[in-house]
Amino acid sequence: MSSSSRYPDGAIGAISAVSALFLAVTVAANGCSRQQAPRPDAATTTGGSAATRARADASTAASDPFSERVTEREAMVSNQLRARGIKSPAVLRAMRRVPRHAFVPASRQRHAYDDRPLPIGNKQTISQPFIVAYMTQAVSPDPYSKCLEIGTGSGYQAAVLAEMCEFVYSIEYLPDVARFGKRNLRALGYGPTQVQLRVGDGYRGWPEAAPFDVIIVTAAPDSVPAPLLEQLAVGGRLVIPVGQDSGGQRLELWRREKAGGSDEEAFKRTTLIPVRFVPFLGPGEDSSSNAPKPGLR
């Protein structure tokens, strides 16, 4: 306020003297140090108050499928898996972490943690949690394993493998189903440096990436495809449902004991449990043909 018109005439002289003194002191002070502008509140510079940040963090967590329905996954692990003989800590940990509801169509999500397979479209299904865990435990992946999955489907089995293996390759025959699985996997952060995807004939495997330590097949051929056996590393394990749905299917575990292509003598074969899977699709396993299929029965 520089105007003096608001003061009585008798006070002007005194005010002028005081003002001059104040000005001199101010100039002297400025000569010694620059006056600091008041700092903005720390919360302003870091995106808002602590309460605001907490609300934002809560909102992010609420939209993160990994943080959703945790109690249901815990119950699934306890009641459906551990109680029925799934003992591998790595498998139980992966099944506890991967949000199955994120791999199920919206109309089926309320049943995501039921102990049963669910349809995902195109006459395909997501396997029941126990079967996913059982097959994964059977092939015993470790952090250094290179894994091949035949039948990407929803992407759920590939995600479970990705939690346990060094790298996963996954093949899907049906383009629409492949897009569904890819969308689910990528949305959860399972990128191409961790899970490589392909649309194609799973009967022929992925020869340029072979050999594999683990191969999981999630559809049932009439016989074990010879190319998959050829692509199994020495010491590698392959788990596969075999047989026609009408005649009964069985889950088999093949372990390569020595080199030797697809020669059956190079493998140890173990029959595990009866199962029921969708049929294997592809030119290598054409269900419309009555011609004999290459492979081992």
Image (cartoon, rainbow, N blue to C red):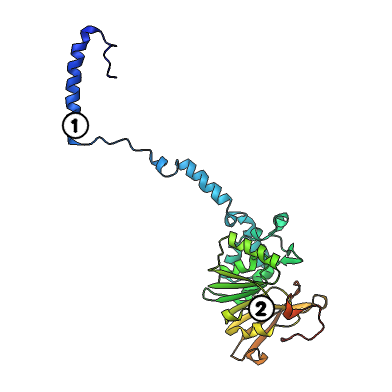
Task: Pick whichever, 262 or 256, lies toward us.
Answer: 262
- Of the 4 image quadrants, the one containing the N terminus is top left
**Amino acid type at image mark 2:** Val
Residue holding disc 1: 29
Residue shown at the point (54%, 76%) measured from the top left: 145
Element under disc 1: helix
Residue shown at the point (77%, 77%) measured from the top left: 249
- Of the 4 image quadrants, the one containing the C terminus is bottom right
Residue holding disc 2: 239
- Quarter of the image holding residue 168? bottom right
Element under disc 2: strand
Task: Pick whichever, 30 or 276, lies toward us.
Answer: 30
Residue shown at the point (64%, 69%) measured from the top left: 133
**Amino acid type at image mark 1:** Ala
Residue 24: x and y in percent read 16, 25
Q: Give the label on residue 4, or none.
A: none
